[in-house]
Amino acid sequence: MFALKSFFGAGRAVLGLGLLAGVVAFGTSTASAAIESGLPAGGEKLTDFLSGGTFTGVQIGNFIFSNFSFTPVTSSPTASSVALNSSVSGVGLTFSAPWSAASGSSNESIISYEVTAVSGVINSMEYDYNGQVLAASTGTLTQVGETLTNNSSSQIGKSTDSNGPAGPLKTTLSITTPQSPIFVATDVLAASGTGGASSISAVNNTFTQQTVPEPATLGLMGIFGLTVLARRRKV
């Protein structure tokens, strides 16, 4: 009998330790896969948000930015040299990195991510960048292309802006059918022909939303409409 009690006592202890270890492991996993609330003044590295990084995303205002990926088209810049900051020109992100091209070279990379509205739907995206042609020549330019897709991987917006000596552009992409989430691919390029030089150090991506009425609000609007219609019929 004593042996049996000891066995069950030891079993409970092992089970308790196992549950405790599971809770600790779960807590660690959750902590390492958190959505960051805002970005610090100095920003974060893009690598903090890539697979295996410190965060799974960041919430800025009413938007959550997540599922980041980085595709280097050329060897520079690298993901570790890209910084993520809150945009000062709207609600969104600023990507900062040394996209610079000397004579006869180019630097290009693609940053992809998901945007989800905490409430409502996304109805537009605006982007701009500080590209400069430092020495003009044939084939020297800075360029940013934005491609928006939906949950079905169907394209819902696309634009590519290039600039020469005149300076950078600002472009708004309106989403015909506002929705959430959307997926963004930002392609940044600095290219220089022989004797040319160009650079981009910051790209801004900002977003606006459209509020979706609550079902209760829609119901009240319907009742109001029927009341007005009934009054008109009586008149």
Image: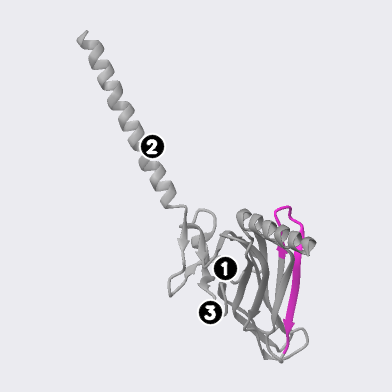
N-term-proximal mark, 1 vs 3: 1
* Disc 2 versus disc 1: nearer the observer: 2
Q: Is residue 227 above or below residue 21?
A: below
**Is 18 part of what is drawn in magenta?**
no
Q: Residues within 10 Å of mark 1 (few under 14, many from 20)?
A: some
Under mark 2, the amino acid is: Gly
- Residue position for label 3: 88
N-term-proximal mark, 3 vs 2: 2
- Residue position for label 1: 78
Q: Is residue 34 above or below residue 8?
A: below
Query: Where residue 174 is drawn, which disc sits there?
Result: none
Seen at 31% across and 30% down, the residue is 16
Cα distance between the residues tagged 3 and 2: 42 Å
Magenta span of residues: 148-164
Mark 2 lies on a secondary structure that is: helix
Magenta-colored segment: predominant secondary structure: strand
